[in-house]
Image (tube, rainbow, N blue to C red):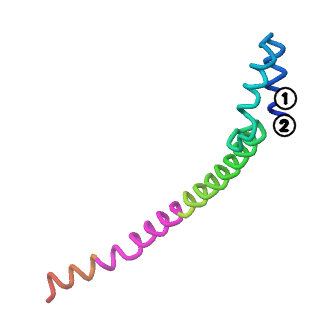
Amino acid sequence: MSQIVTEVYDAFRAANVQEDLAKAAAGAIAGREDLVTKLDLERDVNRMQTEIGRVDNDLKALKVAIADLKADMKLLKFGYGPAILGLLIKLVFFP
């Protein structure tokens, strides 16, 4: 019996389940490759936390880039605004 099956068998026997029923229940679990263990869950949680950290860092970098773009837009509005306005006035009033 594998370790998981032995634990199941021992748990059933400790609960005073008949030996043949305990073996049958433990045997039903044998060979189950799709069972999730605590270690599997811990690995997945760690992997998810790492990925969340990466996404968080990417979002912080994106916020900085957006702030830089906003600053550049303000500079462009301030710098080119009067020039465009002057050009429009010239075109409208002095064709």
Kindly identify the residue that appears in the image at 76 percent across and 28 percent down. Answer: 26
Using the image, determine if residue 28 lies above or below residue 16. below
Q: Position of residue 50 (x, y in %)?
A: 70, 51
| Magenta segment | 66-84
Q: What secondary structure predominates along the stretch shown in magenta?
A: helix
**Mark-to-mark CA distance, 2 and 1:** 6 Å
Q: Is residue 41 above or below residue 80?
A: above
Q: Which residue is mark 2?
A: 2
Residue 86 image offset from top left, x and y in percent: 27, 79
**Residue bearing mark 1:** 6
Asked which quadrant contains residue 31, the reply is: top right
Estimate the x, y position of residue 80 in percent, counting from the top left.
Answer: 37, 76
Residue at the (60%, 60%) spot, across then down: 61
Judged from the image, the secondary structure of the residue bearing numbered disc 1 is: helix
Q: Quadrant of residue 13?
A: top right
> Label 2 sits on what residue type?
Ser
Residue at image x 43%, y 68%? 73
